[in-house]
Image (cartoon, rainbow, N blue to C red):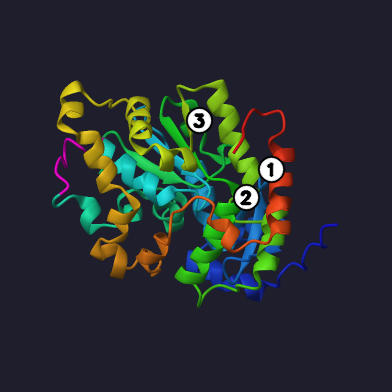
Amino acid sequence: MAPPPPEPPDDQVLLPCFKEMELSQERRDFISSLPIEKSWTTRGYLHNYQGFWFLTMGMQGVLAFQKHFQAHDTDVLLTSSPKAGTTWSKAMLFALLNRVRHPSPQGHPLVTNNPHTLVLTMELTLYYRNQVPDLTFFPTPRLFATHLPYAVLPASAKDSACKIVYVCRNPKDTFVSLWLFVNRAWSTRSIIGSLDEAFDMFARGVSPFGPYWDHVLGYWKKSQENPQKVLFLKYEDMKKQPTSNLRRLADFVGCPFSPEEEAKGIVNDISTLCSFDNLKNQEVNKNGKGMFSEANEAYFRRGEIGDCVNYLTEEMIEKLDRITDEKFHGSGLKF
């Protein structure tokens, strides 16, 4: 049986977040009216909006991005749950779309920048404070990222011809990766109770941008209905066959590798540039800081498949496997 929902926090608990986000009273009242749970990733709360959970500090960005973003037909939107292969996918898409502008691995922007500064997660950056940011300086095709579920995406992203790339990862590794990330990146800001408590909330669907299974199914179904619009990729497949999936990505976003590029080994060059080990060993990712003062090294832990067995009990693994089988039953999606 699920535990009872927590008592709504008094105004003084949410007030610091509201002040930092410079919210109007109307927006404060709206966020305060949403169903709420304590967060296991930060000192704060998760609010249920349109069936999904979002952190208090992120609600302004979610609402503003959803309302104001106007997609171009040439846009590419990378979508994912947190810690499902986002960092790696940002690097690959950036390198693919900018390979004419940046043909050489030497001096490449990925050598001096963390992928998250090159491909912005819209609700966490541009729309975080500024409701209508100026996007005119982004080169075409514009490349953006978001963790929003399909149902919560801006209407223009769904209705335009823009391409949506979705990357997912099995729920066990996704949970463990997120759990370890918040411990490494924001230990001073996180409530970080026990692993058991965080696991129980994740299994109930209470996690940032979750429930995990609804997030995945939303994009999976759209990829089946319209494969020209949504490309659905599994992290595990990308790890096992990086070059073939690079070609899939290039074909999907409309910049396939030419025979000349294939002959020159450009596919392997990009694969090597974006490899986990290469990115992890760049100075900016060993000692740099991110936009929220998190250590960039927190984004590069191990990147392995099946690392969850080192943290989850057999009972936990069986529970998530059972939930996954139930949630994905009849969808055709398997891990």
Residue sitting farthest toward the right: 1
* Quarter the N terminus occupies: bottom right
Q: Name the residue under label 1.
A: 324
Q: Could you say which disc has been placed on residue 158 in the image? A: 3
Secondary structure at numbered mark 1? helix
Q: Which amino acid does label 1 sit on?
A: Thr
Q: Is residue 98 magenta?
A: yes
Residue 176, image x and y in percent?
57, 59
Circle 2: residue type: Gly
Closest to the observer, 144 or 111: 111
> Mark 3: which amino acid?
Lys
User: Where in the figure is residue 297, as x and y percent of width and height?
Assistant: 37, 65
Q: Which of marks 3 and 2 is in front?
A: 2
Task: Give SS at disc 3.
Answer: helix
Which range of residues does the magenta coloring cover?
Answer: 97-105
The residue lying at 49 percent from left, 64 percent from top is 181
Residues under labels 3 and 1: Cα distance? 26 Å
Q: Is the magenta stretch mostly helix, strand or loop?
A: loop
Residue situated in front as seen by the camera: 301 or 70: 301
Q: Which marked residue is nearer to the observer: mark 3 or mark 1?
A: 1
Q: Is 225 positioned to the left or the right of 262 in the image?
A: right
Which residue is nearer to you in this view: 75 or 128?
75
- Rounded to the nearest angstrom, the CA distance separating label 2 from label 1 is 14 Å
Horizontal relation, residue 9 to residue 212: left or right:
right
- Residue on which disc 2 sits: 210
Task: Note whether residue 205 is visible.
Answer: no
